Image (cartoon, helix red, strand yellow):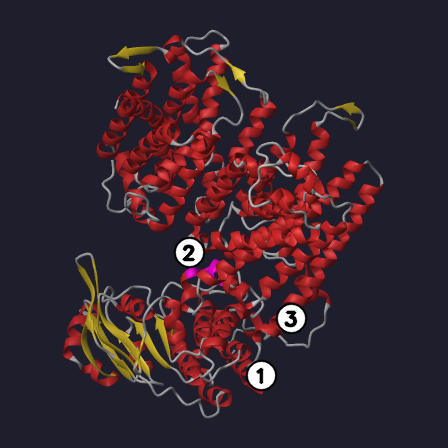
């Protein structure tokens, strides 16, 4: 076993180091391209089947296929926001409505408008633009509205955003119904220039696929996904919540605007009830049934619901089918819609396809990649942990990966009088410590001593009542993501990996932030971090499938990828056996040396702390009880009384 | 002044129905962080039960209790079949599940009965007006308000004195901690659905006596009002839901009597804008859920 362990570690050292550069571009090439090809291919298949179906029947079939492609644009528009941020929006069709009305008001022929809406303001009856120009302005209006609504929706958390967008949809409809001078009210505004055939809907759907795929693999899209997976952990990795969500909202608003315009242009008229709540539910069902997280899922869901509704409509009309007369059933398509949605939500909340993306699947199975042999026998982590205790070749690896060890930053992490009071309870009281650059510093104390609260104060999850945090003479203030970018990155006591993302992507997101905000610090590439953490053979598995020990090491690797000045590790060995803890000691040392950061390790296990740390601070009841070298602390009578006393007494 | 008081009475009459529904919505949010858009379907159920019984000449004295009972049973059934399975899921899944149930119910009534409304005759008392000095008071408004007040008082007593009430309050505060203290999750949630169903049934009875018809989509609008009321009061806060429901009922009447006629159609929009602003300014609602004293 021991030999097996050494082998992969030693081997990784010889792997040529990829240049630490342009992670976005490489992501576009390796993820976006296959996904784009796969999903556009999917579209072509649908188009072919659709053409076959339509060629054998009435013009109603023509319309159905046209509708399918228009709905695809809308569903993919929803997917960009909802799928990537995990925030449910009911308001997107309100955006579509605004865009479509703008287009219609500009494009309906002047002579028709003087009859339909003679009293419209701003000289609208005189204006007559080409359908294309009107459509572009309509999309612009949709983007503007999406931006304003997004400012509100992206700032609030999940449920509030849902309610606000729902209210927006209702408001748009009411205004459209009541501003009769402008919209003609409940009377539909007809004579909208029509598009014939499927050309534009298909082009629209292809554009939507392109935008959705590119957004998902763009930097901002990956940040949005990180906030979906875990808002808190994303913040701790320097990822802001508001901006990616706002951008996602605007991009999805633009697509939905396009979809709304296409819909109105294929119908030739527009009315307030066209973009209704019921239609929103239909689009959401298409999104959720297939799987909102991937473009493939969204497309599959759209096709599935469209086919299902068509079949149930056919059956509900009371046809003579399969030899006997079916009864007329009014409302059967709605029953199907609700039933399908409910069945998927109750049994597979992530949709039928979950994380499945056609392009990535094809790549994995049919495109030969340079062999990167998986390590045999190291799948079982507990054994690996046991073996590691004695034989992990710590030093050779460290020296090989980071030959000299990058020069540590020369600024210390200091707190001055840091404290916080919850209600009447002083959780942390006037704590001043100094963590030297490049050193491993321990923070220890019995349960409830305020250790985690102290880390929350450092990283901004809890606002301090008193005191300051500094790295060198820079004061760390504000939201967690700002502090992460300023140089502290952390792990969590109760594991917070991004569960649905792959191991590699977990680390890559922090690496992406590092490129923008921590580029002055020496970096270790994602591949090297994978190797250092012994995770490379499971790099493409989703993080949720890893066992406990591997998730712990992944979390540390992710924190390290941010290239922090200081790594804050909150109980990295909690729940581990002593053998595993010792392996963790080596692991933390290796990682810290590789990125040249200081480390603040929090634990309640004195053995672990004195083993790993040069300098130790002891917290008790929120205040500093003692400080000193590991040896001094072990001898300190106060520590023995307050801490060890309780453990051994 | 006369008009003012008259509006107040009308508004409280409407508002008491909203408040009864809102208390249920808020209670369910408290125990499982669900905004239950399927809650309005309990009214639809009650309506069809009343229609069925009245068209067979069964007395109102029987029809109303049976309608209320049917709401309780349907509420528990929905929990058992659907919400129990997604209890641990995200707010996203919960919310969408409730919408799916709502649409399923609409479709089921359309298929099972018809999409055209089914009418029944309202009893005389429903529209009886007595003149009391300068005011025209509808008897049924007074009945509504009295029944609602009785329910609120009953709920307050239930929450304070019964084990079930204690469990509901504990679960709303911190569900996990409540479980550790021996509160049975299934039982308290199922109980909350039953109780919310009871209040919805009563609200429905008040409303349906006057309404005189049952149709598949009838539950959606009052439920939306109730959700708004619960949001105004701070989701999870029961006194907040009462105040939210009553003030929404009153606000609607005043909006309608004061807004210029060309803005009348926008009444709901004004309410929505107020809600949206409220959400941004005070996400926790008018009452802070944590500090507001519970009913």
In what element is the residue under mark 1? loop
Both marks 2 and 1 on one chain? yes
Q: Chain of mark 2?
A: A
Query: Height in image: A621 above or below B271?
Result: below
Residue at 42% in and 40% down: B272
Residue at the far top: name it.
B57
Can residue A353 be seen here?
A: no
Query: Was residue A230 drawn as part of the magenta stretch in this picture?
Result: yes
Could you tell me how far apart the alpha carbons at marks 3 and 2 are, in whole angstroms? 32 Å
Magenta-colored span: A226-231
In what element is the residue under mark 3? helix
What main secondary structure does the magenta stretch of the protein show? helix
Q: List the residue tagged with mark 2.
A: A155
Rate crowding at label 3 as few (under 14), some (14 to 19) or many (20 or more) other CA atoms within 10 Å: some
* Total numbered circles: 3
Query: Height in image: A291 above or below A38?
Result: above
Q: Is residue A81 left or right of residue B128?
A: right
Image mark for residue A19: 1
Task: State which mark lies toward you, 2 or 1.
Answer: 2
Query: Height in image: B2 above or below A559?
Result: above
Task: State which mark lies toward you, 3 or 2.
Answer: 2
Q: List the residue tagged with mark 3.
A: A30
């Amino acid at each position: 076993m021991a030999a097996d362990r050494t082998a992969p570690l030693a081997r990784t050292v010889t792997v040529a180091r990829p240049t630490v550069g342009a992670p976005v571009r490489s992501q576009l090439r390796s993820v976006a391209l296959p996904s784009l090809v796969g999903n556009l291919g999917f579209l072509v298949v649908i188009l072919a089947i659709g053409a076959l179906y339509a060629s054998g029947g009435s013009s109603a079939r023509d319309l159905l296929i046209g509708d399918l492609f228009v709905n695809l644009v809308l569903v993919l528009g929803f997917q960009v926001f909802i799928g990537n941020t995990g925030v449910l929006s009911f308001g997107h069709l309100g955006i579509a409505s605004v865009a479509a009305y703008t287009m219609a008001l500009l494009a309906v022929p002047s002579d028709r408008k003087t009859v339909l809406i003679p009293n419209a303001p701003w000289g609208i009856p005189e204006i007559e633009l080409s359908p294309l120009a009107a459509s572009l302005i309509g999309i612009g209006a949709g983007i503007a509205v999406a931006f304003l609504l997004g400012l509100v929706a992206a700032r609030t958390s999940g449920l509030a955003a849902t309610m606000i967008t729902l209210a927006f949809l209702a408001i748009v409809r009411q205004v459209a119904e009541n501003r009769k001078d402008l919209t003609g009210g409940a009377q539909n505004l007809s004579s909208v220039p029509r598009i014939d055939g499927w050309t534009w809907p298909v082009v629209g759907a292809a554009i939507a696929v392109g935008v959705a795929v590119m957004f998902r693999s763009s930097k901002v899209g990956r940040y949005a996904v990180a906030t979906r997976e875990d808002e808190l952990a994303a913040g701790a990795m320097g990822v802001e919540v508001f901006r990616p969500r706002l951008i996602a909202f605007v991009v999805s608003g633009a697509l939905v605007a396009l979809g709304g315009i296409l819909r109105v242009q294929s119908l030739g008229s527009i009315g307030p009830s066209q973009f209704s709540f019921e239609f929103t539910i239909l689009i959401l069902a298409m999104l959720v049934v297939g799987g909102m997280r991937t473009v493939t899922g969204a497309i599959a869901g759209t096709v599935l619901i469209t086919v299902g509704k068509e079949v149930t409509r056919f059956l509900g009309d009371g046809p003579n089918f399969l030899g006997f007369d079916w009864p007329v059933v009014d409302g059967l398509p709605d029953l199907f819609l609700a039933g399908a949605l409910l069945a998927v939500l109750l049994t597979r909340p992530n949709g039928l396809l979950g994380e499945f993306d056609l392009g990535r699947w094809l790549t994995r199975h049919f495109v030969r990649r340079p062999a990167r042999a998986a390590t045999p026998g190291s799948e079982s982590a507990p054994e690996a942990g046991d073996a590691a205790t004695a034989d992990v070749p710590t030093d050779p690896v460290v020296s090989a990966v980071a030959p000299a060890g990058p020069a540590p930053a020369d600024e210390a992490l200091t707190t001055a009088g840091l404290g916080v009071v919850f209600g009447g309870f002083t959780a942390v009281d006037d704590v001043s410590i100094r963590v030297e650059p490049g050193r491993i510093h321990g923070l220890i104390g019995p349960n409830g001593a305020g250790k985690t609260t102290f880390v929350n104060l450092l990283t901004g999850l809890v606002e301090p009542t008193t005191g300051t945090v500094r790295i060198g003479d820079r004061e760390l203030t504000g939201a967690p993501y700002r502090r992460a970018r300023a140089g502290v990155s952390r792990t969590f006591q109760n594991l917070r990996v991004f569960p649905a993302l792959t191991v590699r992507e977990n680390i890559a997101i922090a690496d992406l932030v590092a490129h923008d905000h921590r580029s002055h610090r020496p970096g270790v590439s994602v591949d090297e971090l994978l190797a250092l953490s012994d995770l490379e053979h499971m790099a493409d598995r989703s993080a949720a499938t890893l066992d406990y020990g591997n998730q712990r090491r992944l979390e540390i690797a992710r924190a390290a990828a941010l290239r922090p000045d200081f790594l804050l590790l909150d109980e990295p060995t909690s729940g581990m056996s002593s053998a595993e803890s010792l392996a963790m000691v080596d692991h933390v040392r290796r990682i810290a040396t590789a990125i040249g950061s200081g480390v603040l390790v929090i634990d309640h296990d004195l053995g672990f702390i004195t083993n790993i740390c040069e300098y130790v601070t002891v917290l008790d009841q929120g205040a500093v009880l003692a400080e000193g070298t590991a040896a001094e602390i072990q001898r300190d009578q106060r520590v023995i009384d307050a801490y060890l006393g309780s453990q051994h007494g | 002044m006369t008009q003012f008081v008259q509006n107040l009475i009308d508004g409280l009459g409407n508002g008491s129905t909203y408040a009864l529904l809102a208390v249920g919505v808020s209670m369910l949010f408290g125990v499982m962080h669900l905004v239950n858009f399927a809650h309005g379907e309990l009214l639809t159920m009650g309506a069809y039960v009343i229609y069925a019984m009245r068209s067979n000449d069964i007395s109102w004295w029987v029809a109303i209790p049976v309608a209320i009972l049917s709401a309780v049973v349907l509420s528990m059934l929905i929990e058992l079949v659907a919400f129990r399975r997604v209890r641990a899921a995200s707010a996203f899944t919960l919310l969408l599940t409730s919408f799916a149930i709502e649409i399923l119910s609409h479709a089921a009534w359309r298929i099972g009965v018809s999409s055209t409304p089914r009418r029944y005759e309202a009893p005389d008392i429903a529209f009886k007006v007595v003149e009391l000095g300068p005011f025209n008071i509808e008897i049924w408004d007074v009945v509504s308000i009295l029944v609602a007040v009785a329910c609120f008082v009953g709920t307050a007593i239930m929450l304070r004195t019964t084990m079930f009430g204690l469990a509901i309050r504990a679960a709303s505060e911190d569900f996990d901690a409540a479980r550790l203290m021996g509160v049975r999750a299934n039982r308290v949630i199922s109980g909350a659905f039953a109780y919310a169903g009871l209040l919805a049934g009563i609200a429905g009875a008040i409303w349906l006596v006057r309404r005189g018809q049952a149709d598949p989509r009838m539950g959606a609008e009052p439920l939306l009002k109730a959700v708004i009321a619960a949001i105004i009061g701070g989701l999870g806060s029961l006194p907040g839901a009462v105040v939210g429901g009553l003030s929404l009922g009153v606000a609607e009447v005043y909006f309608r009597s004061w807004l210029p006629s060309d803005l009348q159609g926008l009444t709901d929009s004004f309410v929505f804008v107020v809600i949206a602003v409220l959400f941004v300014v005070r996400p926790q609602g008018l009452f802070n859920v944590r500090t507001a004293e519970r009913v």
